[in-house]
Image (cartoon, grey):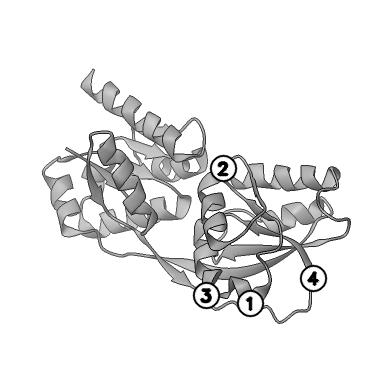
Amino acid sequence: MSILVTRPHPDNEATAENLRARGHAVLLAPVLKFEPVAFHDESETSYSAVIVTSANAIRAVAPQLPDLGLLKLPLFAVGEHTAAAARDAGFAEVVVAGGDAAALRDKLVQSARDKRLKKKSTLLYLAGADLSRDLSGELGAEGINVVTQTTYRMAPVKLLPREVCEGFAAHGIEAVLHYSRRSARAFLEAARDEGVEISALAIPQCCLSETVAGVLREAGASQVLVAAAPEENALFDTLERALRTRLA
């Protein structure tokens, strides 16, 4: 029996390695494909900090970072995974939020109140093409000016790998891990197109957040579990709980 990881490459490889270390067999079905978007900041704005909600935003602009002059700025990361990507890219001052956009917003608002951010400063938000919430707007309502620059998009992968379809048909997959709302939707669309939607939704769906879980519930999944915190170890704990429940 295998655990299905829907996370995009290359992060899915690290997830698979961690799951195998826990004794699980793993199948990979990256349902979104990373595509960098050309970064052109033609404004003469002087930024005080950088905001990032995904490691993919760092990957997309990594080759340009030395020339852009951003590495000298403090970077506010949504969580530790994104923070690690920022440090690897060369950012020296990285502030880590609690794992989701709401926590990042609160961290930035508090930093402004504590005067860690300069008054009337402008922040650069390196973002994906499809945003789950208007972080720039929320920060603007708090008096924090944000310029959003799209650096990447995640394109849906229309087909599931053949071994995954065969795994669903043979009831050889015991749970699915979901990391984002968009990837959950892409997974459902691919499963529907492959004719395995019923089998796919009949097993535990382990989700990184309640926002992700809502997509699976709306689709009719009956075993939807949500991690206690929006980070991978908590998701793994949720997986173990789901598997124990199935064996009981």
Q: CA distance from mark 2 to mark 3?
A: 24 Å
The tag earlier along the polypeptide, 1 or 2, is: 1
Q: Quadrant of residue 123?
A: bottom right
* Type of the residue with mark 4: Ser
Query: In whole angstroms, how far apart are the C-alphas of marks 1 and 4?
Result: 15 Å
From this viewpoint, is residue 6 visible?
no
Mark toward the start of the polypeptide (2 vs 4): 4
| Quadrant assignment, res 103 | top right
| Mark earlier in primary sequence (2, 3) | 3
Q: Nearer the viewer, mark 2 or mark 4?
A: 4
Kindly report the distance in space between the C-alpha atoms of the residues bearing marks 1 and 3: 17 Å
Is residue 49 shown above or below 233?
Answer: below
Q: Are marks 4 and 3 in contact (CB under 8 Å)?
A: no
* Residue placed under numbered mark 4 in the picture: 46
Mark 3: which amino acid?
Val
Q: Which residue is mark 1?
A: 67
Spatial CA distance of label 1 from label 2 is: 29 Å
Q: Residue furthest top?
A: 248
Q: Is residue 91 above or below residue 81?
A: below
Which quadrant of the structure image shows residue 223?
A: top left
Residue 2: give x, y in percent of width and height: 20, 41
Q: Residue furthest right?
A: 119
- 165, 45: nearer the viewer: 45
Q: Secondary structure at mark 4?
A: loop
What is the secondary structure assignment of the residue under circle 1?
A: helix
Q: Residue 37 has which mark? A: 3
Tag nearer the camera, 1 or 3: 1
Label 1 CA crowd tier, 10 Å (few <14, some 14–19, many 20+) = few
Which residue is found at the position 60% from the left and 71% from the top?
A: 65
What residue do we see at 32% from left, 28% from top? Answer: 240
